[in-house]
Amino acid sequence: MSAQQSQIIETGSVTPVGGKHVIHCLTIVGQIEGHYILPPQNKTTKYEHVIPQLVAIEQDPRIEGLIIILNTVGGDVEAGLAIAELIAGMKKPTVSLVLGGGHSIGVPLACSAKQSFIAPSATMTVHPVRMSGLVLGVPQTLSYFDKMQERIVNFVIDNSHISPERFRELMMNTGELVMDVGTVLDGENAVEEGLIDHLGGLSDAIGCLYDLIEEQDGAEEDGGEDDKEEKPKAASRKKADGEKASSSPNTPSGNPPRKRPKAAGKKKSGEGEKASGARNGKDADTKPKGGKKKQAGGEAR
């Protein structure tokens, strides 16, 4: 059995390496299993299996992007929201594709990717938070539901193009579902409402993911070239400053100035003035004496 087949059987995911870019395909199907183990006849996605995969994908330098295939009826709210937060916090390019259905907590999961797609035949159900089983009929329980629902609303509006007022309106719609409150959106309506970015299939989602990968690679290359250009500029400025500081009429360029040649030059110029004064019949003792005093003072300093 090949490594890819074994990976599909064990985790429901695969990392194909024969394409243009190395991407990881993560499937979220059935019901999202959270803090409680569901019956064996239920098709489930265990969040404790998905979370380590997301961490490994983000850290593996060989994997360039992630595509999430969704066909879920929902499930544990906190488990689904935890997976959605991890996907939204990834630096690598991510694309989601809703096939069949992306209901309940599947809505934030679909919105968590950088770009989202939905098939024309797929549907998404938007409804308030519900709980089955024993519920304590106290005001604190209703307050807890309200806070949990606000977490979902805030995440969806932060990662999609729908307004909070419209999203709450879809959640509280009472005229569409027979036994529940909420709204069912097909693929085209989900895009019109702003929950999903694009209407398309698998090839569209993979093509978009390739574009995101190439854009990120191009941005990283441009950033590296900018860093390389800044270093030579700084070095050239440093070299120019060094040449300016070391330039002297009596010393070659690049060598540090010396005090002794300067003093010798002054003495030599004084002797020349003395000789020229003697030839012209002037008092030649005045200038050399001043020159000597000035030279002595310079040496004392």
Image (cartoon, helix red, strand yellow):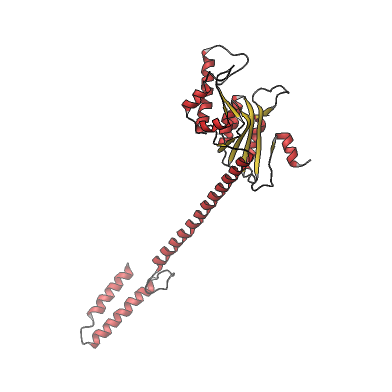
Q: Quadrant of the N terminus?
A: top right
Q: How many marks?
A: 0
Q: Is residue 36 above or below residue 63?
A: above
Along the viewing direction, whichever of 189 and 220 lies nearer the viewer: 189
Q: Is residue 58 visible?
A: no
Q: Residue furthest right?
A: 1
Along the viewing direction, whichever of 114 and 48 lies nearer the viewer: 114
75 vs 293, left or right, is right
Quarter where residue 89 is shown: top right
17 vs 192, left or right, is right
Pinpoint residue 159: horizontal percent, then vertical percent.
52, 34
Pinpoint residue 271: horizontal percent, then vertical percent.
30, 81
Along the viewing direction, whichever of 58 and 204 lies nearer the viewer: 204
Pinpoint residue 97: horizontal percent, then vertical percent.
61, 35
Identity of the residue drawn at 62% across and 24% down: 76
Pinpoint residue 297: horizontal percent, then vertical percent.
29, 70
Quarter where residue 266 is shown: bottom left
